[in-house]
């Protein structure tokens, strides 16, 4: 099987728990002080058992800390029970997104009555209940120390809100209030449960619910000043299949385009269901932003025509090359709340994934710029960074031979007034040097101003946060 040029980023890495000083090429802005913490899969096998999907790998946290003295790096595996049990038993012990461990007949029967949720929180980083946590799509956030990356244990919610599936992309208000949802599987109907979590508390308050017969796989959702919206794509399941099929989680979902996409809209403050608007079939992992526009709700996503991308993320397929998959494109769903209709508009022909905006200033508001990874050369997965002007569709690009960047994260300059006044941070895999580096771009010109090589090749990761050393904790948003 041919190997993709970025396959080095899909191999198991060693952790570096002790801080290491890194050389810096270029000039860092004097105001840039803080820590970029990133999360993603860093181990893809346990002895002779391999995980099937990129989303299954065991979580590895990385931290690049920027001070007056320069840049330092450390990394640690998240000490989840999924990780510690695998280490102790020498095998995969917990079910994952697309991997189901070999279990005895008795163990399989017992999981029907007591489903096990993985705490392998390998997707994102957020502030929750007064702590920094690693998140995945099960409601088991894992606390960690952002300075040492030590694992501190699973958050123990002080409520009875039920549902085994959630999002690793909650939304936050400037005061730290968090909004999210869980999906409660049941027959004959399952339930989407939206909730609010006040800052520094562990009690989720249910806001509203919506019953569906076949719940959708949704990786993220939308929030504006007035509304919450769940865009339910036609990748759906029968809840009984999860318990009885014996298949890994995602393999129970079926693409049923004839169902179309259902946009469920709720009032943000009360959770009241406003409307459900049908529209054409589509799929997306990531929302870009959303905002109110009179009687309309605008929802921007990194959109695919179907859910083929989920299968192309299986490790065997991903490691062999990506030339038969088209990159997501920025698309706007304009939902007319009076007429209960929705239209689609492509905002740019530039491909984009893991999109990020100036969240603190623009989330839930009209905005102009989005940053993300792109695909310059067919088969090269994500081999460039892009900045798209959502008002014109024009794009700026950064790329370098043999380099594969991760999600770009915007950090605003102090007292900035322009939406793109600051820097963009990304961790880039350099396959020629067989190591990764921290890349710093000027956000306005989208040109490189500095880089700091890490001591190893860092596996391609999913999401992260820049923890500004001078910012109040409540101002640190996705």
Image (spheres, grey):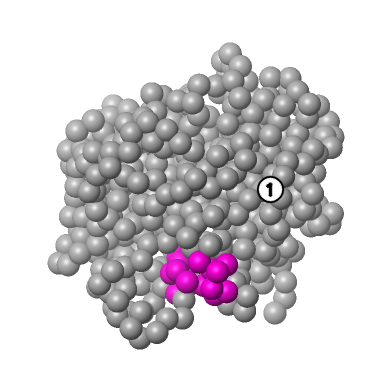
Q: Position of residue 19 (x, y in %)?
A: 73, 41
Left or right: residue 364 versus residue 348 is left
- Extreme-front residue of the structure: 88
Q: Nearer the viewer, residue 168 or 346?
A: 168
Tell me: residue 23, above or below residue 109: above
Q: Position of residue 233 (x, y in %)?
A: 34, 57
Q: Which residues are magenta?
A: 85-100
Left or right: residue 74 versus residue 205 is right
In the rendered image, which quarter is residue 119 located in?
A: bottom left
Q: Residue at point 55% right, 53% down? A: 78
Tell me: residue 162, above or below residue 394: below
Q: Quadrant of the N terminus?
A: bottom right
In the rendered image, which quarter is residue 146 located in?
A: top right
Q: Nearer the viewer, residue 224 or 118?
A: 118
Q: Nearer the viewer, residue 311 or 166?
A: 166
Q: Residue at point 50% right, 29% down? A: 476
Q: Is residue 178 magenta?
A: no
Could you tell me if residue 281 is visible in this image? no
Tell me: residue 348, above or below residue 217: above
Q: Residue at point 68% right, 48% down? A: 17
Left or right: residue 108 versus residue 357 is left
According to the image, label 1 marks what residue?
A: 17
Q: Residue at point 62% right, 59% down? A: 42
Q: Is residue 87 magenta?
A: yes
Q: Main secondary structure of the magenta part?
A: loop
Q: Position of residue 287 (x, y in %)?
A: 44, 44
């Amino acid at each position: 099987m041919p190997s993709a040029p970025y396959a080095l980023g899909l191999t198991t890495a060693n952790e570096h728990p002790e801080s290491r000083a890194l050389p810096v090429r270029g000039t860092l802005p004097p105001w840039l002080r803080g820590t970029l913490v990133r999360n993603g899969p860093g181990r893809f096998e346990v002895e002779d058992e391999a995980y099937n999907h990129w989303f299954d790998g065991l979580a590895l946290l990385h931290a690049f800390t920027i001070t007056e003295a320069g840049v330092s790096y450390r990394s640690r595996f998240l000490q989840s029970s999924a990780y510690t049990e695998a280490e102790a038993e020498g095998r995969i012990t917990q079910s994952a997104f697309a991997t189901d461990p070999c279990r005895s007949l008795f163990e399989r029967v017992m999981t029907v009555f007591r489903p096990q949720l993985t705490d392998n929180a390998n997707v994102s980083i957020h502030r929750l209940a007064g702590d920094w946590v690693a998140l995945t799509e099960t409601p088991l956030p894992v606390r960690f120390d952002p300075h040492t990356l030590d694992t501190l244990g699973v958050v123990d919610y002080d409520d009875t809100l039920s549902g085994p599936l959630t999002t690793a992309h909650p939304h936050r208000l400037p005061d730290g209030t968090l909004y999210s949802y869980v999906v409660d599987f049941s027959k004959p109907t399952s339930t989407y449960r939206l909730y609010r979590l006040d800052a520094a508390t562990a009690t989720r308050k249910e806001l509203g619910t919506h019953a569906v017969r076949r719940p959708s796989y949704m990786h993220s959702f939308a929030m504006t000043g007035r509304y919450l919206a769940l865009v339910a794509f036609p990748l759906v399941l029968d809840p009984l299949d999860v318990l009885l099929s014996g298949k890994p989680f995602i393999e129970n979902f079926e693409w049923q385009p004839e169902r179309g996409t259902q946009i469920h809209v709720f009032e943000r403050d009360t959770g009241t269901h406003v409307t459900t608007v049908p529209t054409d079939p589509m799929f997306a992992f990531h929302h870009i932003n959303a905002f109110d526009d009179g009687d309309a709700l605008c929802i921007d996503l990194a959109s695919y025509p179907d859910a083929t991308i989920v299968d192309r993320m299986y490790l065997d397929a991903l490691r062999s090359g990506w030339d038969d998959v088209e990159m997501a494109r920025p698309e706007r769903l304009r939902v007319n709340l009076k007429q209960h209709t929705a239209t689609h508009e492509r905002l740019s022909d530039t491909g984009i994934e893991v999109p990020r905006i100036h969240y603190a200033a623009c989330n839930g508001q009209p905005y102009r710029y989005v940053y993300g990874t792109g695909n310059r050369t067919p088969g090269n997965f994500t081999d460039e960074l892009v900045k798209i002007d959502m008002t014109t569709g024009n794009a700026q690009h950064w790329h370098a031979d043999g380099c594969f960047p991760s999600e770009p994260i915007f950090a605003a300059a102090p007292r900035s007034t322009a939406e793109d006044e600051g820097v963009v941070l990304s961790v880039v895999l350099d396959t020629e040097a067989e190591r990764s580096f921290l890349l710093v771009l000027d956000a306005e010109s989208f040109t490189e101003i500095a880089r700091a090589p890490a001591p190893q090749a860092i596996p391609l990761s999913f999401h992260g946060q820049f923890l500004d050393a001078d910012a109040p904790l409540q101002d640190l948003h996705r």
